[in-house]
Amino acid sequence: MVDWDALQSAATEIAARAYAPYSRYHVGAAALADDGRLVVGCNVENAAYGVTLCAECGLVSQLHATGGGLLTHFVCVNGAGEVIMPCGRCRQLLWENGGAPLEVLTPEGVLTMDRVLPQAFGPEDLDRVR
């Protein structure tokens, strides 16, 4: 059984460390890996908005930097600790690192990634053309 409250608390805690001087919109993300590790990330803005790093980017980087594996449970919050949805780019990151069965806590409850990103494009699509 996943402790979604603890996962949301970890995301809220890391959101406080976000670097968001331009938007002032802090975002934190927390997830569990398939080996039980907790990985977190926060957004890091840049004056050139296109190179801003979303919280999910940091989380996926930490996943790979600490041993890899797959994400199994994920939540993303704003600076007030309210559950928010990942942007489209980040949904793709989550798909690539958790796949269809990844459980995501959303404002509407827990959904699997195949419901969050239906008809997703992934590595298997690239394998078909090789």
Image (cartoon, helix red, strand yellow):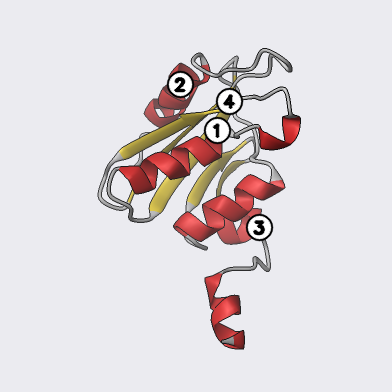
Q: Residues within 10 Å of mark 1 (few under 14, many from 20)?
A: many
Identify the secondary structure beneath mark 3.
loop
For badge 2, the amino acid type reads: Ile
Q: Earlier in the sequence, mark 1 or mark 4?
A: 4
**Residue 25, quarter of the rendered image:** top right
The alpha-carbon separation of the residues under discs 4 and 3 comes to 24 Å
Identify the secondary structure beneath mark 4.
loop
Residue 26 numbered mark, or none:
none
Tell me which residue sits at (61%, 86%) in the image.
129
Tell me which residue sits at (73%, 17%) in the image.
23
Q: Quadrant of the N terminus?
A: top left
Q: Are marks 2 and 3 in contact (CB under 8 Å)?
A: no
Foreground tag (4 vs 2):
4
Foreground tag (4 vs 3):
4
Residue denoted by label 2 = 14
Q: Earlier in the sequence, mark 4 or mark 2?
A: 2
Foreground tag (3 vs 1):
1
**Where does the image place residue 22, in percent across and percent down from the top left?**
73, 15
Q: Are marks 3 and 1 in contact (CB under 8 Å)?
A: no
Residue denoted by label 3 = 117
Q: Are marks 4 and 2 in contact (CB under 8 Å)?
A: no
Q: Residues within 10 Å of mark 2 (few under 14, many from 20)?
A: many
Residue 55 numbered mark, or none:
1
Residue denoted by label 4 = 44
Asked if residue 4 shows in the view, the reply is no
Foreground tag (1 vs 4):
4
For badge 4, the amino acid type reads: Val
Identify the secondary structure beneath mark 1.
helix
